[in-house]
Amino acid sequence: MAKLRAVAMLPELIRNFFRKPNTVKYPFEHLTPPPDYRGKMVWDADKCIGCQACVRDCPTNAVDVIKAEPDVKKFNTTYRMYTCIFCGQCVDSCPVDCVSWTSSFELSSDKPQTIQYNASPEAIALARKQAADKAAAAAQAASAPKPEPPADKPAA
Ligand code: SF4
Ligand code: SF4
């Protein structure tokens, strides 16, 4: 019986002998991950509006979002990759699409990996200018003379 099985396997054995292996010699060779691969998360801190949805919805407490400067609405994100389970809830929750996956998968480390995504100085300067312009426009509108109410029509 065993002899029969070995004979039946022979064609398959011969075919596989000449086939290229499906595996690669990692780490010397790499396969390209598929387009929807869930690798390391990245935040576009310049787009973040600080709504805290990603912080609230993360099941592993892997994210903190805090103001970049006390007087400006720009935000920095701390991403504790060592607790992330790559579930993608933060991607689904973000209302302005500033969280995304990368295809980066070589993430092992002997230390807990924490990554900081900070708003750029240019984005902070722009937000500060916009806030100042808005405040100036509001002050100007408040100090502008109010239009006179229309005079009452004489009785007919
Ligand atoms: S992918 Fe999941 S676990 Fe990782 S930061 Fe986003 S919500 Fe948290
Ligand atoms: S959900 Fe998006 S916009 Fe809201 S705090 Fe997180 S990254 Fe920022």
Image (cartoon, helix red, strand yellow):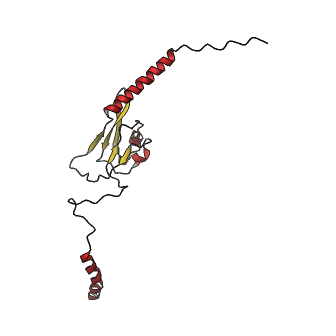
Drawn side of residue 46 relative to residue 26, left or right: right
Q: Quadrant of the C terminus?
A: top right
Closer to us: 55 or 96: 96
Q: Residue at x 37, y 32 (%)?
A: 74
x%, y% of residue 143? 50, 14
Residue ranking furthest to the right: 156
x%, y% of residue 127? 38, 29
Instruction: In the rendered view, tell whether residue 80 sits above or below residue 143.
Output: below
Instruction: In the rendered view, tell whether residue 39 sits above or below residue 74.
Output: below
Instruction: In the rendered view, tell whether residue 30 sits above or below residue 4.
Output: above
Instruction: In the rendered view, tell whether residue 134 sits above or below residue 146.
Output: below
Drawn side of residue 69 relative to residue 97, left or right: left
Q: Residue at x 33, y 32 (%)?
A: 122
Closer to us: 124 or 86: 124
Count the marks. 0
Quarter-wise, where is residue 114 in the image? Answer: top left
x%, y% of residue 79? 31, 43
Closer to us: 23 or 151: 151
x%, y% of residue 24? 24, 64
Q: Residue at x 40, y 47 (%)?
A: 91
Q: Quadrant of the N terminus?
A: bottom left
